Structure formats: C-alpha cells, structure tokens
Amino acid sequence: MRYKVSLLLAVFVTTFNIIAQNPIFTSVFTADPSPHVWPADPNTLWVYTSHDEPGSNNHYGMTGYHAFSTTDMVNWTDHGRILHLENVDWAESHAWAMDAAFYRGQYYLVYCMKEAGIGLFRTGIARSDRPEGPFTDLGYVKGVEFGQDPAIFIDDDGTPYLYWGHDRKCYVAELNADLMSIKPETYTDLTSQLTHVFEGPWVHKKDGKYYLTYPGLTPRRWPEKMFYAVADKPLGPYEFKGVFIDDFEGQSGTNHGGTVTYKGKDIMFYHSAWLSGGLSETRSAMADYLDYDKNGNILPIVPSKEGLGNAKRTKTTLKLEAENGFAAGGELYNVIVDTWIKGYSGKGYVTNFDNPYDHVSILAQVAKPAKYRFKVGYASPDGESNHDILINSRVYREFVFPQSKAFTEIDFGIVELKAGDNVVRILKRDWKPSTGDFAIDYIKLEQVFEDEK
Ligand code: FUB
C-alpha cells in the first residue's frame, strides 16, 4: 500500500454528530477538492473532486470525477460523474487529483491519469460549456511529464499557469493560450523552495501575493500535513512559511485541497478519512475557514465537525441530467437528446421513446447503503406515457406518467441505494399509448437522514 497509516488513524473513532458540517459530502467518497466561484455567478460555489470507490480503500482504482455546487453551503447538488477513464482514450488508470478553470468563456477540467501502455502520469485537459460538465477530453499537456496533481491558476491579467508535482517534486510553467502545452522557457522546478513538499500544489492570490499551498511530509513521515509558501510572482521564487494543517484525528494518509473566496470569506477545502471511519484511502472532502494574521500569514486550521459553522448538517442531492448519457456513466438506448420543449434543466432532455425497451439509464454513485428520495423531471405534452422504472436491474415501478405540457417533477418517495454504482433506468414498456414527445429531463436523489423519515 502506497501510504502508511499512522497510529492516529488506527485509533480513530467516528464521532461526528448528526449536525456536523464536516465532512462536507456524506453521500459519496470524495478527495482532492478543488473549489471555485465562476465569474458568471458569484452566488454559486463549485467544488470538483476525485472519487474514491467504496470498498477499495486503494488509490489505484480511482476512475472518475464529480462536481458539486451550492448557494448556501448547507444544501449541495452532486452533478454526478463529470469525466471518467472511459472518456479519455489516451489513459488507462489512476484518475487522481484535478483542478478546474474558467478560461476564455469555457470551463476546463485539468486532471491527471496514467497514459495507456506507458504508465506515466500525464496532465489531461477536458472542456465543457457548462460548469457541471460533462467534460470532453482534449488530450494531454505537451511538455509535462510525470504530470500528477495539476493545478491551474489564471492570473488577473489572464495568463494561465500550471503547477504540478508528486513524489517530493513540484514544478510550474506558463501555459500557451490553448492550454495544451507549456512555454518551455518558463518551466521552473520549485522543489527546493518548498520545504517538505510531496505533491498537490495549489495557488491562490491574496493582497497581491501568490500563496502556494501543498501537502508535505516531514522527513519521510506519513501522514501528510498542509504547508504553504509565498511569492511575489506566479513562477516564484517562493518563501517557505510553514505548516497550517497539522496532524488531526481521523485524517487520511494524504491531504490535498485548495482555497476559494466565497461571499467574502476565505475557505480551505481539503480531505480526511472521517466518512469512512478512518480508512486512509477512502476519503471525504472537508471545509474550514481560512484566516490570516495582519502580516498575511495563514493561521493554523484545526479541522472541526462544525466546519463552516452553519449549525445545520450538509445535505446533498444528486441531480443527474438524462441528456449527459455515456459521459456521465449512463446510457441512451434508441432515444435522442432534444431541446424543443422549453423549460428543461441542463443542456436538454431525452426523448423518442418510440419502441419497447427504448430507455435512458443514469448512474448514481454513493458511499454507503442509504435511503434517498427519488424524483423524476419529465414532460409529456401529448398524453400519458407508460414506462418501467428500474433500479439496479429490478423493476421498481411500472408507471404511467400523466400528461404534462410543461416540465414537472414527480416524487416517487424513498428508495434504497447500495454502496457504489447504482443504475436507474427509465424504459418504454410497450406500444400503448403513443408517447408523442415524452421527455425525461433529470432524476434527483435527495439524501434522507434517519431522524427525518
Ligand atoms: O487522490 C489520489 C492522490 O492522493 C492524489 O493525486 C494525491 O494528491 C493524493 O491526494
């Protein structure tokens, strides 16, 4: 196993209470959180994460990424799988840490995977016209070898920089405008400037200074602590400042994250092993406020159950758009994506359920067996339409969707999901009656807590 689990983890007990804000997401295992507020909507906070498979407790099996959004830091939407190894033809494994960027009107996911046949980490670039993806791979960044743990930083003048590094190394380079290659003359090895660096660089700017935060190891000792260094320019030189997230109860072997300013407050996102009860490689995203002293030094963060302190536990709703299909882990079988009926969410809806067995499948990934409230967004302007709804290959309901000229939502009540991948399928049952423009817009699965039922 790659990381040694400390004695601290071995004695960890899951004590977080039911109104805990940390871990932030309790519906799915998440790691390496990358938080952002995009220019078009300062009211919405986005967090992009890598995904730990339940039951694996192993980084090697990581295969994809998720996007989450919120407007109140209590109610979160999990937009599902936004990119997967299956969608990246040059890669074979290790969907490890990523970052996201808004650049010249498009959203980018900057991620690392191992190149097929070679087994070296590359830094991949994928693009979407929407912050929630799904993202389409464009290839890997030329000039970056061993490109694990990329972070992209767009400076105020629009210049894009790429930071990356692992195994006690860290590098930076300016990217060319298409983001697909670095400018070789700007390539800089930062390793000697970042005491204890191991991997996972992240840069943010505060009062004109560039803060580079990174997980590091004090001489060869796991688990990772979070350190930082400060510079006057993105390429450095960086001045080492010290540790700001030290060892804490229930941490995982790794720590990795980033910062964001949201509604006037600075927040640090990172990860722990709290949700899995101390399984070091089955992680969960965390968030606490990030504060500075009057000299601009980052004050220590002590991970807390209260986290962002909203006195309410966080709650996640999976909102899975039907039209995202294969890219989001689903399937469109003999149906099409359309935009004719207005009022849909996302990029469109799925329609043309003309023949028996025509269907849309949607992937819902969850951490643990749990109950969720199941809702379907649909329209059926031309009359009622009969369908089977299957959850994990079993018929959950035979249902006649009533006529509805506009998009509307049906609440099917509580369903039980298993840990890992769940497939929800909406399938045309038979020839009667005519479905006309019957349209599936999305499914929602809302977390239900035991004391709420
Ligand atoms: O999540 C997989 C790997 O673990 C990341 O790439 C590292 O930064 C560490 O968090």
Image (cartoon, rainbow, N blue to C red):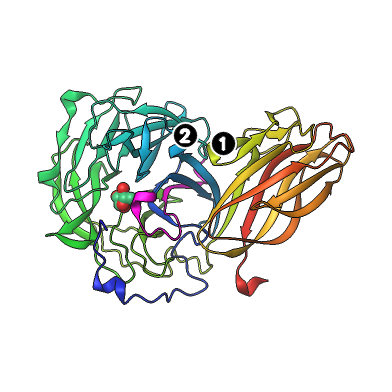
Residue 13 at x, y percent in the picture: 38, 77
> CB of mark 1 within 8 Å of CB of mark 2?
yes
* 193 vs 124: above or below: below
The image quadrant that residue 185 belongs to is top left
Relative vertical location of residue 148 with respect to residue 394 in this rendering, above or below? above
Residue type at tag 2: Asn
Depth check: 185 or 53 in front? 53
Q: Which residue is at 23% across, 48% downward?
A: 199
Q: Residue at x 61, y 38 (%)?
A: 331
Residue under label 1, please give it: 326
Quarter of the image with the N terminus in it: bottom left
Q: Residue at x 30, y 33 (%)?
A: 117
Quadrant of the rendering where the C terminus is positioned = bottom right
Q: Name the secondary structure under disc 2.
A: helix
Is 60 in the magenta? yes
Q: As shown in the figure, which amino acid type bears the numbered disc 1?
A: Phe
Asked if residue 334 lies left or right of residue 129, the reply is right
- Is residue 273 one of those drawn in magenta? no
- Magenta stretch in the rendered image: 41-61
Return the residue nearer the eye: 313 or 42: 313
Q: Which residue is mark 2?
A: 87
**Label 1: how many residues lie within 10 Å, few (<14), some (14-19) or many (20+)?**
some
Residue 421 placement (x, y as % from top left):
54, 52
Q: Secondary structure at mark 1?
A: helix
Decide which of 233, 244 is in the foreground and name it: 244
The tag on residue 310 is none
Is residue 164 shown left or right of residue 322? left
Q: Residue 307: x and y, percent? A: 42, 65
Which of marks 2 and 1 precedes in the sequence? 2
Q: Nearer the viewer, residue 329 or 46?
A: 329
Counting other residues with Cα less than 10 Å from the Cα at mark 2, is it few (<14), some (14-19), or many (20 or more)? some
